[in-house]
Amino acid sequence: MNFAAMPSINAVTIALCRAILCDGILVDPRKMPTRELLGVGFEIVDPRKRLTTIPVRRWSSALAIGELMWNVRADTSVEPLAFYSARWRDFADEEGNIRGSCYGARIFSPVLEGLSQWDMVKKLLVEDKSSRRAVLTFLTMRDVSADTNDLSCTNTLQFIVRDDKLHAFVNMRSNDVIWGVPYDVFLFTSLQEMMAVELGLDLGVYRHYAASMHVYDRHFKLASDIAALDDRYDARGEMPRIESIEEIERMKLVEVELRLGGSVAPSMSPYEHFCIEALSRHHVRQVA
């Protein structure tokens, strides 16, 4: 399915499960039995169809939104993520920080003369609309050699502008179809839309490539259930449009307020309304 054009993340998930269960090779990196395909890519034509709505998958929109806002704040503390999924604590260091998958800290923290990677990429595309150098980097050689339980799965996120549309290209060293792909696509297509809004461009296509695309043995049954689904979910899962970057700035603060049990003012846009509803439902379940 290399770079097959897909309408949504739902269609991608179903196609990946089918491909890996049919043609995947059994391997055991770190003594974890896995079915794997090498060099797999896909394209999502409408990156706003980033919501996984396949019932059997039980994907959490609250976790996805919480992760997005955590990244936009350039946070590294595990606890804001553990509020939505306690499993995140398995990837934290002794100080309670995420050191590899803290993508926001890598791209939104100042690195050169007060500018972040995000700032520099945006400036580059403003000055040279046709540039092929607008690359955000997540993985460092220090990460590769470190003794860690959290190594960045993502190498780069590249933006290219063509025909006044912002296209995104993600390169992964490793990608878990069940736990990784749905949340990765949500995060990176959201960042793609944020950059498009900041540049005043239309949203282009999203392309995603993984050197290792895989399913762990504990998820073989779930992958089989997903692979057996028909195409009824293909067109579902569209999220409201991000109209302005101010919506993101407000939401990154609102997420904190809701998580800590506070109340928030009525939402100001369809995007904010969607996010607040999803986060509020999770908070209600936590309290109950």
Image (spheres, rainbow, N blue to C red):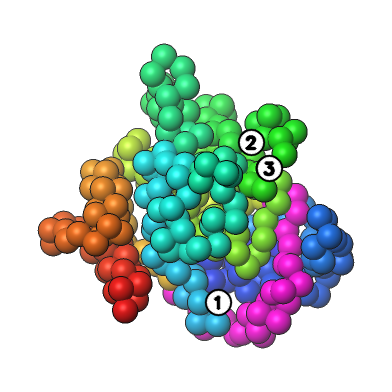
**Tag 3: residue type?**
Thr
Q: Is residue 278 magenta?
A: no
**Tag 1: residue type?**
Arg
**Tag 2: residue type?**
Leu
Residue 110 quadrant: top left
Question: Which label sits in the foreground, 1 or 3?
Answer: 3
Find disc 3 in the rendering and name its residue: 148
Q: Which residues are magenta?
A: 210-236
N-terminal-most mark, 1 or 2? 1
Left or right of 107, for residue 65: left
Find disc 2 in the rendering and name its residue: 139
N-terminal-most mark, 3 or 2? 2
Residue 71: % across, % down: 43, 45
CA gap between label 1 and label 2 equals 29 Å
N-terminal-most mark, 1 or 3? 1
CA gap between label 1 and label 3 equals 29 Å
Secondary structure under tag 2 reads: loop
The answer to which of 11 and 187 lies nearer the viewer is: 187
Find disc 1 in the rendering and name its residue: 57
CA gap between label 3 and label 2 equals 13 Å
Residue at image x 58%, y 36%? 138
Residue 134: % across, % down: 52, 30
Classed neighbour count for the residue bearing mark 1: other residues with Cα under 10 Å, few (<14), some (14–19), many (≥20) = some
Task: Please say whether residue 132 is visible from this viewpoint.
Answer: yes
